[in-house]
Each structure stands twice: as structure tokens, then as C-alpha cells.
Image: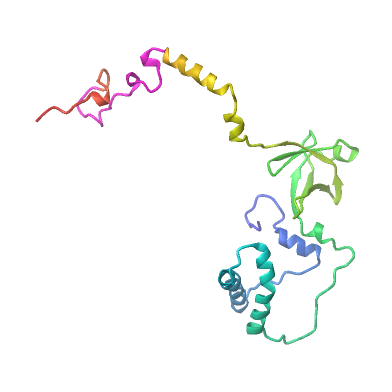
Amino acid sequence: MNNKDAVGGDGVTQFGRALLALNIDIICANSPHAKGRIERAFGTLQNRMAKELRLAGVSSITAANAWLPGFIAAYNRRFSREPANAKDLHRPLSSADDLDEILAWREQRTVTRNLTLHYDRMMLLLDPTPLTRGLVRKKVEVVNYPDGRFAVQFNGTALDFKVFDKIRTAQPGAIVDNKRLSAVLEQVKAQQAAYPAHQQRGHTARRRPPNNLEAPGLPSKGRAPRHAVVAAPI
């Protein structure tokens, strides 16, 4: 987040970092006219396009991708305007521009003394090498690619690592299918039934008597249980 009051970070968003790597300047919409133009585009994408998809009966990503070129052509025929300067100022990618690396999500993590770091509820264990041993208490980058891959880098150098631990959720079926579970529960139930009445959970003898707010004028101690208090006839 580009938060002015942030405790850490450099104040650059992931989008800003990618544009900086591609040598592209950000031109913000600071005038009311420019902001209105952006809001109209948002209204088209969030309102008009959603209704057009519904009218066309599109209900899957594959069908939407096949439908989209026709929508763009029709929209441009209706609303596009010729530019004042027809010169194409787009710059081709250079050989050093690796979009897979530039457009990946990058976050910094601190290496612990055990050569570990935490990311996305996982513990990553770096392989002990002369390079990684010198990274204790230093920042490394965890790179998350759109295809699901992720890597750990230091100044552009990839570091070998292993996933040491990951939070796992237990499947309910694995618990229900335990053959010993029912026997254990029956044993616990039998032990609880053998307790005296005042020690059994849920027994009427353990119920709290009503306080003075529930039964004004009656003492709190030595009072009959709540269900036994009957109003006197008038």
C-alpha cells in the first residue's frame, strides 16, 4: 500500500515498481476532466460490460474471452475519437526487459539466524551456503509468479530453499473414520456418569440459583433452583 503513515516500506506500490523497472513515468489524473474520463471508463467496465455479458448469455471465462473482441470493436466504433497526434510513441521491449520477473509480486522478508523466513503461512528454509550464511538479519525478496511459482532472491540472485513447514487443515473424514473414537467417547461418558450429582456437568444440582435481580428480596445462598421458584398466588 502507498500509505503516507506506513511504518516500513519505501512507499512504492507493486504497480509503481513494475513501471519503474520498465522506465515508464506515471502521469496521474490531477484535473477534474481527466478524473471524469477515468470514472467514465470505470463505469463502462463495471456497469455496461457486466450487463452486456448477461445479455449475451456469457457465464464462463472462455466464452467471455471469445466475446470480448466484438465488444471492444463495437465500443470503439461508437465512442472512439481520432487523436490529435497520430504518431505512435510506444517503445518496444528491450532484450533486458523480462516481463515474467518485472510483473511478478515481490515482498521482502528478513532472514533469521536459522536461515529461515516466513511467507504466506509457510516457513522457507534456505540451503546453508556461504552466500546465505551472510544474509542473517538481512532482507531478501520472495517473488510470487502469476503461474503459482515462487522464488527467493537476493540482489537478483536466486537462492535455493525448501518448504520446511506449512499450515495444514485436517479433513473431517479422517477424524470420523477413527475406529477408536467412539469407544473413547463411551468411556468418558461412563466416567462422568459415575461422578456425584453435584460434580456432573449439566446436572440440575449444579445450576446457579437466581440472583437478586431475577428474584428480588430473596437471599442468593441456600435458595431453591430457578425452576423450583414458583410465584405465590395472589
Q: In this view, does 161 lie to the left or right of 75?
A: right
x and y, in percent, of residue 31 in the image: 62, 76
* Colour approach in the figure: rainbow
Q: In this view, does 177 lie to the left or right of 22?
A: left
Q: Residue at image x 85%, y 39%?
A: 132
Q: Residue at image x 40%, y 21%?
A: 201
Q: Does the magenta stretch include residue 214?
A: yes
x and y, in percent, of residue 52 in the image: 58, 72
x and y, in percent, of residue 119 in the image: 72, 43
Q: What is the magenta range?
A: 195-219
Q: Residue at image x 66%, y 66%?
A: 63
Front-most of 34 and 103? 103
Above-or-below relation of 176 to 72: above
- Quarter assignment of residue 197: top left
The main secondary structure of the magenta stretch is: loop
x and y, in percent, of residue 72 in the image: 67, 76
